[in-house]
Image (spheres, helix red, strand yellow):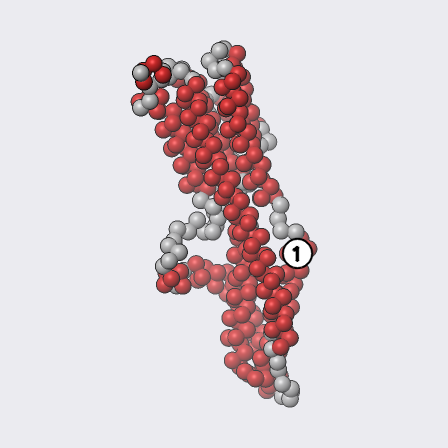
Amino acid sequence: MIRYKTTDWLALIFKSYSKEVLRKLLPSLILIGIYTAGIVYLVNDYWQFNFVSTTEVHSILGIVLGLFLVFRMNSAYDRWWEGRVQWGNLVVTSRNLAYKLNAYIPADDSVNRDWLKMMITNFPLSMKEHLRGGVKFEELRFPNEKIEEVLRSSYGVPGAIVGLIYERLNVLIKSGTISGEQLITIDKELSVFSVVLGSCERIRNTPIPYSYSMYLKKFIFTFLITLPFAFVTEFEYFTIPIVMFLFFILVSIELIAEEIEDPFGNDENDLPTNELTFTIMRDVSKAFEMGDEILPRKIEELQ
């Protein structure tokens, strides 16, 4: 994700990201330039048609196209923002879960504390890659070989991690380490893990409706292919840069919308899931350390 100052106009105007869009569009820009040059040559020089070009039709179509592009960009941004909200929930929930487990599990129970800390941090690590198409197991930490085997053989690693945490908590209840009431409070956070995972999967797996995407691309294509005829007799060869500029503007909007509608990848406009994952890992580790180094373990010690 690009970090920038919204008030820095000059930096935004001359940001190199526009050059990246231009690089992607360069072959198409050259093609539309050649096409427009051919139209201008045939109409004005070869056939010498005597007609007056007009932009009235394209002005009307431009209003309709503008409405389509606004809806397209808004729908893509809604997906991006919902993904950011869900990851924000994950950061807060992971922190709260670690605080509660730190308070409930005795400070001298290093086995369970380390196990739970390891699995909580494994969840965002696995989820960010799960949303990109595959989990990087070398990033995860495994308490033992059995856990590693279970996760490597599971269909959905993040969901499997939540299930393993529930199993561990069940063992802690039976051993009397935590109570049923404490489990109820912990369950609120673990349920959010599943909700966040499901919401992000829905965003990733549900693209813009096919008919809308297809129609919009056809609309843009038809608008741009016929655009030279609106300027050809009045602007002659100046029609070429005019059409190329309008092509760059309209297609760039569509490219940006395509990029941000799936916000979990590694593009410049995607969510900073790597940074958010690091934040979760740092906060969870600090939360579990609080019981040993900062906060007293018993209420009596506060009195």
- How far from the left and from the top, in percent, is residue 22? 48, 63
140 is higher (above) or lower (below) than 222: above
Say left or right for 121 vs 286.
right
Seen in the picture, residue 107 relative to 256 is either above or below; the reply is above
Q: Which residue bears the numbered disc 1?
A: 212
282 displayed left or right of 167? left
Q: Residues within 10 Å of mark 1 (few under 14, many from 20)?
A: few
Q: Is residue 78 toward the left or the right of residue 112 in the image? A: right
Residue 303: where, in percent of width, then height?
31, 16
Classify 231 as above or below 139: below
Question: Outermost residue, top direction?
Answer: 175
Q: What amino acid does circle 1 point to?
A: Tyr
Question: In the rendered image of this protein, does residue 68 appear above or below residue 157?
Answer: below
Is residue 294 in view? yes
Q: Secondary structure at mark 1?
A: helix
* Quarter assignment of residue 121: top left
The residue most toward the front is 303
Residue at left 61%, top 61%?
A: 68
- Is residue 169 visible from the viewing direction of this image? no
State the residue at coordinates (51%, 47%): 81
Q: Name which residue lies at 45% across and 61% down.
A: 18
Residue nearer the viewer, 106 or 251: 106
Total label count?
Answer: 1
Residue 51 percent across, percent down from the top left: 64, 86
Q: Give the camera-side residue of 146 and 76.
A: 76
Residue, x 56% and y 32% (percent of image)?
A: 194
The foreground one among 168 and 6 is: 6
